[in-house]
Amino acid sequence: MNEPSARSVDVLVVGAGPAGLAAATRLAARGAGRVLVLDREQQPGGVPRHCEQRGFGPPGRWWTGPEYAARAAEAAVGAGAELSCGTTALGWAGPTTLDTTGPQGPERITARTVVLATGARERPRSARLVPGTRPAGVLTTGELQQTVHLYGQQAGRRAVVVGAEPVAYVALDALRRAGTETVAMVTGLPRSQAHAARAQWARLVGRVPLLTGAEVVEVLGRPRLTGLRLRRHDGRGAVLACDTVVFTGDFTPDQVLARQGGIALDAGTRGPAVDAAFRTSHPGVFAVGSVLHAAESARVAAHEGALAARSVLCHLTGPGRWPTAGATVRVEPPLRWIAPNRLTAGAPTACTFLLRTDRFLARPLLRVSQDGRTLHCERLHRTAVPGRPVPLSGTWTAQVDQEGGAVRVEVD
Amino acid sequence: MTVTSSGPLPEETYDVAVIGAGVVGAAIARELARHRGLRIALVEAAEDVGEGTSKANTAILHTGFDAAPGSLDARLTADGSRRLARYAAEVGIPVERVGALLVAWDAEQLARLPELAGKAERNGYHDTRLLDADELHALEPRLGPGALGALEVPGESIICPWTTTLAYATHAVLAGTDLHLNCPVNGIRQDGDRHELSCARGRLSARYLVNAAGLSADTVDAMLGHHDFTVTPRRGQLIVFDTFAGDLVRHILLPVPTALGKGVLVAPTVYGNVLLGPTAEDLPDKRATESTAGGLAALTGKGRRILPALLDEEVTAVYAGLRAATGQDDYRIRAHPEQRAVTAGGIRSTGLTASMGIAAHVTGLLAEVGLDLGAAGELPPLRMPPLGRTAARPCRQSGLVAADPEYGTVVCHCELVSRGEIRDALAAPVPPRSPAGLRRRTRAGAGRCQGAWCGAALRDLLERSPVREGV
């Protein structure tokens, strides 16, 4: 009675967020065969499910997150993909076989190809090693959004938002919706990471002051949060009274399944290392979306899903050769990571790399080199902002010596 | 079967009131509950059992090999360890006999190992073994460079402290004990042959009294007019690393003890995480369970030396607990015959291990001061939910899910906790009253996302449960 039931599919997509659904939609529409999408949540759509703000969907559309999630799921099902929500992937039973569970019971699913689209999560307060008491009222943006938008629960009276990435402003919206006053945003950086208009609006119209160059050094209160102790970089300290704090940003890939499968991870992104065709180190296993670069917008993730579908189709119909690891791509500080980060022969050269920086960089010159040989130089015509994507063209990948050392990307 | 958390207290006179529903108080209540003729009240200041020291410790089931030979601590730890190991197997408390290695990092520490082996012998523990550096590194390949050797103590085990306290309390309640939560004791008055406890929720009277108030044992003793000891909280901060770190360490890695205490250990947990800690800081405040930047930095520094790869893994949780230090090495367990009372104070790091030994000892002392225990019977059968890494979660079991699909509906994704298990916890004899209480019973919200994905859903289930409406 404890043997799981078994079935086989052509493509198994793990995660029904923007990337997974976009990949499944394309694959099903282009005749990839039996395409099954799993999601551990009860509803498909991933993070957009609990993002009430508008701005989702193709350019020109102005959908809310839930509208977007519903449309993406409809598109996948309409194209012929099978969607299985409330189904959790438990681990691997073979190179492309996953054990799952759900209300229908444990199941063993063997696929010709697996696409990991497991997304990202925000590091909670504990992982950031913020000391202090452990009171109620300490949230991440994701938990706040679910609290407010999915469950209609209270979010306290006075909140502080830690972080100034675009997602921090999304948290601000959720707090406003919950009727919670936001007393301040706090960032260790010298300025906001959001678009200037957004930051200005929050500060001037929303009357939420942005405290820059400041860090939370202690959480106070029990059983409910009563305040946060801050320290400014100039050494001054202060206590902000609040009953809610939202730790935002600081995304990390949800790479549990990849790591359980022994798939090689990139030291920078901490997600699976992939080439420009979204191929991981394991034959038949692709990875796409925020699990590769935590975290990108739904639009970027969905675009990648569509691109990955092309690679998956090639693999399903082609000779089935899986490229062994070529050179890797590494970044130098203050760059934090780059994706894709695995170079293989035969991968698309027209790809775009995405980078992150730890510091604000005004119009940086990015240099790509291998074994001391410069392959490419490119100036970014705007400021590179921490927590926001920095693009780098992939036109140089054909020049890479597959037998050579790591390709280095640095700021000149 | 009565658990109250609000409203007036019963007017009846109990035979025994046990003050404090930590691991020690709950164990005592359970032991007394075997005597079915007794009416017992277990009185707890907090809203749940095990809310103090019992919930925040190193979760180790000791052998007692390093206790002070001849002390009460040594005797009750050895006795309690055997009893708890048996009880754990009976009711399903997660325990793993992973063994401990006392690692020597310098010549001085290495030279002390034979002495510690001798101490273990004097404590009646004969299974220790001295390892050279090669043997040590073969057993723990990820150990940092520089370790010179170790003393192996194969009997040291890891245990789930939450399930232990909860099992005791549940067993006591199932056998008829009244558990009164949210019920701090503010004063004790003698009224003839009865104690009148003045509690935050009203008066409670009992013929016999057990003080198992942990950090507040000195305060409760003072209410009885005793000033035998003062509890000085000793804070221990701990870091819990992600289950991916679980592959890095196989044993409990203990430092060689110094005059300053037992030092910082690295140990696997029964849930698959890795624990690093504790610090040891004497504090005046009995509520100072906050972590500090200095404490965490000290721990990560030590952890990096013991197990360098550990620091590359994600931190899942940080917590701090307070041990009830009394300035004395031994337990302060004392009967007050004239008052028909027993104090179980100064129960420090071995309290979890010794709990059942202490319970048997205290029950004996109650009989000595005049309590007629009557015959002891069997307790009703009890099976706790298996939270350990070695057990298959219900969502992985076809038979269970087929019989009840709620066990296949996963709510907490990190720890694979199903809605069925949460429902069961909410309907249990001692139900949770907070997300933290639910976490200790099911592990829901205890994983790497710390409730970021499931916190709102868990609060929703908790708030809609009938238990909450009744409190």
Image (cartoon, coloured by chain):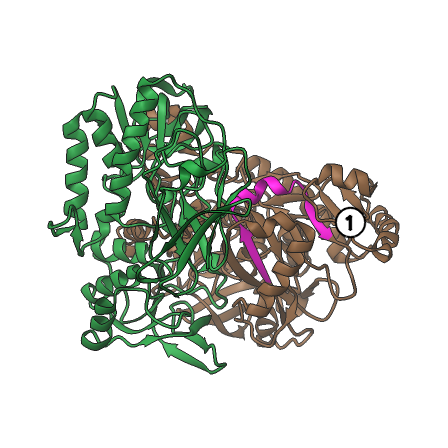
Say above or below: A85 vs B171.
Answer: above
> Which residues make up the magenta segment?
B237-254
Chain A: drawing colour: green
Q: Which chain is mark 1 on?
A: B
Question: Is B172 included in the stretch rendered in magenta?
Answer: no
Residue at image point 30% right, 53% down: B456
Q: Amino acid at mark 1?
A: Ala
Chain B: drawing colour: brown
Q: Nearer the viewer, residue A215 or A224?
A: A215
Say above or below: B404 vs B317.
Answer: above
Say above or below: A276 vs B304.
Answer: above
| Residue that label 1 marks | B147
Does the image show residue A28?
A: yes
Does the image show residue B436?
A: no
Residue at image point 55% right, 38% down: B378
Q: Nearer the viewer, residue B6 or B365?
A: B6
Q: In the picture, residue B258 is in which quadrant?
A: bottom right
